[in-house]
Amino acid sequence: MVATLGFITIATFLVLTLSRRVSVLLCLVLVPIVFAVIGGFASDLGKFTAEGLLQVAPVAVMIAFAILYFSLMVDVGLFDPIIRTVLKWAGGDPMKITVGTAVVTLMVALDGDGASTFLITVSAFLPIYKRLGMRPLVLTGVVALAAGVMNMIPWGGPTARAMASLDMDSSEIFRPILPAMAAGIIWVLFASYIIGRKERTRIGRLQGELVGAVADEPGAAGVVDRAESKPSTFDNHDDVSEGDGGAYTVTDEERLDTSLPVRVFNIVLTLVLVGILLFQLMPLEVAFVVAFALALAVNLPSWEDQQALFQKHGGNVILVVSMIFAAGVLTGILGGTGMITEMAQALVSVIPSGGGQFLPVVTAVTSMPLSLVFTPDAYYFGVLPVLGEAATSFGTDPAEVGRAAILGQMTTGFPLSPLTAATFILVGMSNVDLGAHQRHIFGWAFATTIVMTIVALATGAISI
């Protein structure tokens, strides 16, 4: 009875969220409440809900202050020198431009916000791509690959949802997957190199055909001379990274001016924060609260500037944090009523004997393609808790299923998914058809998940 009620709850949640007829937040709160009442658990709803909210509170705090911290760092131009250096190094070589696009995206995506990542990277690179005759499709593809891998960070949406739904912290979900993520980053850089070389060859071939066609025209010798005297596309032009909107001069008009000591402070503080993340020196929510307070005091000492920052980025914080707390209602009720346990036992009963050990691997391999079918909320709050409990029944650590999920579900898959608004920002700003973008980069994105899965297996983050 409880298992059936649980499956109906999950099915109703998925149908409503996938149909987009009701907001995800309402579904997360009202659907479990309705079915808990139907199941006779009305008297315990307060306790179940409170327990769920307490479980997700640390995750919500971490996300809130992580978004504020990295949004402030973007506003003060922490990553601008890196972007300018990359553009100057790339010059006019399409291959270097492509690799540089990946490097800059990896840096900018540290804020965990796909929309802002796409806005910054496309604004910085699209003029350069157009000037060199590179296809915007290459830009969207490379940005998607780099942003997808970086979406695995703990304050990004998928990992935060995985931690919230399984009631775990970053040391259990994210830290063991770091080697796999590093391999994913290396793979993205390699893929960008290959894609860039192909684009360089394509442009060189087109230029050769153009010069040849002009030379065949009667009386066109003067035109040929002009064509041949044109500087090579692959010359290291410094002007490619300067002027004409081609450089990272298209930064936000609200970019905050900071002095050299403040910029050095920001760099040191960010490095310390990353070190705390990697070595788990303190709870991440505590680290981000303290780091943001220090950064705010140093960069924006006036009350008016601080209020302006909260007004500018507060909307993103409220949207994400409210969703996490709403998810706490769902997971608290599903766990408190025993629905998750009963559903997992029902699932275990239909899985062939010995098949349970493959659950993490199956989850990992299917995670990226399922980004095209499931919204992150539907997958992480509706499907993952059941998979985690099923893993426990087979003697497998449920954290392995959580790690497997973030190897692709709305990480490498999110910049291709039609279920995320950020995807449309990416293709819309680049004037690229979504279908063409998906066909161009799906194989590379899926390969990224496979590479990370192999490394995760080799390092023991997931097992068979």
Image (cartoon, rainbow, N blue to C red):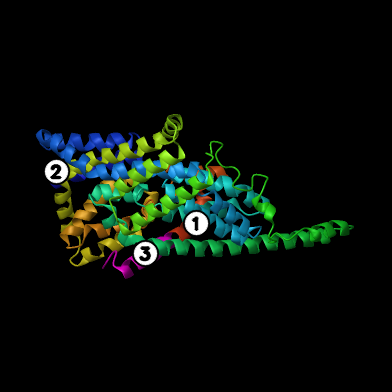
* Residue 450 placement, left or right of 123: left
Query: Which amino acid type is marked by label 3?
Result: Pro
Residues drawn in magenta: 446-464
- Mark 3 crowdedness (10 Å alpha carbons): few <14, some 14-19, many ≥20: some
Residue 86's x, y, as percent?
57, 56
- Mark 1 crowdedness (10 Å alpha carbons): few <14, some 14-19, many ≥20: many
The residue carrying mark 1 is 441
Q: Earlier in the sequence, mark 3 or mark 2?
A: 3
Name the residue: 84% across, 60% down: 225
Question: Is residue 452 one of those drawn in magenta?
Answer: yes
Q: CA distance from mark 1 to mark 3?
A: 23 Å
User: Where the C terminus falls, by quadrant?
Assistant: bottom left
* Residue 441 placement, left or right of 396: right
Residue 297's x, y, as percent?
41, 39
Residue 96's x, y, as percent?
60, 61
Q: Earlier in the sequence, mark 1 or mark 3?
A: 3
The residue carrying mark 3 is 179
The residue carrying mark 2 is 336
Q: Are marks 1 and 2 in contact (CB under 8 Å)?
A: no
